[in-house]
Amino acid sequence: CYWQIQPNRNGISFDDWIDLDIKYIQERSLWIDIKIILRTSRSVFSAEGK
């Protein structure tokens, strides 16, 4: 989901979280999932996710 790859995901409001989930559902595609996986991997390996 989009909220998981936001730079400030710990500070995101519940309403914004839901809006981002709805946006993900509306725009879902294999390409979007690949982009999310790549951004998640980058965050994990660069310690951005702390």
Image (cartoon, rainbow, N blue to C red):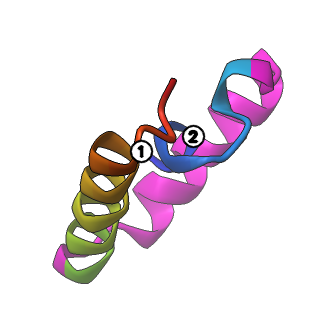
Residue 48 horizontal/vertical position (percent): 51, 41
Q: Determine the residue positioned at 58% across, 57% down.
A: 23
Amino acid type for the residue under numbered disc 1: Cys
Residue 22 horizontal/vertical position (percent): 56, 46
In this view of the protein, which residue sits in the foreground, 23 or 33?
Answer: 33
Segment tinted magenta in the rendering: 11-30
* 46 on left or right of 15: left
Residue 20, above or below 35: above
Q: Residue furthest bottom?
A: 31
Residue 3 image label: 2
**SS state under label 1:** loop
**SS state under label 2:** helix
Classify residue 1 by image quadrant.
top left
Q: Are marks 1 and 2 in contact (CB under 8 Å)?
A: yes
Q: Determine the residue positioned at 51% across, 23% down.
A: 50
Residue 38, above or below 41: below
Residue 32 image label: none
Residue tagged 1: 1
Q: Is residue 14 magenta?
A: yes
Residue 26 horizontal/vertical position (percent): 48, 63
Secondary structure mostly taken by the magenta-highlighted segment of the chain: helix
